[in-house]
Amino acid sequence: MNVEFVFILQMEGLVELHDNIMFYLIIILFGVSWILTSVIRNYASSRSPISHKYLNHGTDVPVHNNSHSITLS
């Protein structure tokens, strides 16, 4: 076999591998972006009372120890 012929076969294999990886990468990225967009649009805090119910940042959580009462903020 000729050296150039072996190189051409290897390059064809690498190009096919690259094409397959890019195809599935684009499919995965499209699916993830679709899911993130739908979650952000459907569960916005201004439209969904459920998401507002669980936004408890900055509230005090009392933790009772045996002898002391501690408040975490």
Image (tube, grey):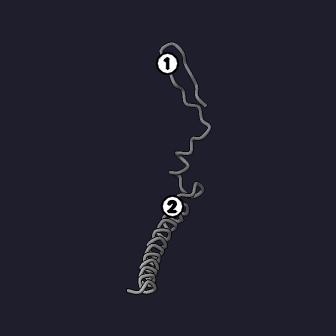
Name the residue located 46 percent from the left edge and 68 percent from the top edge: 28
Q: How many marks?
A: 2
x and y percentages locating residue 22 in the rendered image: 48, 74
Helix, strand or loop at label 2? It is helix
Which one is in front, 22 or 30?
Answer: 22
Q: Which quarter of the rendering shows the C terminus?
A: top right
Three-letter amino acid code at disc 2? Val
- Give the residue pinned by disc 2: 39
Q: Are marks 1 and 2 in contact (CB under 8 Å)?
A: no
Query: Where 3 falls versus 67 (above or below)?
Result: below
Pointer 1 or 2: first along the chain: 2
Establish if 1 lies above or below 46.
below
Q: State the SS at label 1.
A: loop
Q: Camera-side residue: 1 or 39?
A: 1
Which residue is painted at 62% across and 37% down in the image?
58
Q: Nearer the viewer, residue 64 or 23?
A: 23
- Residue 65 is tagged as 1
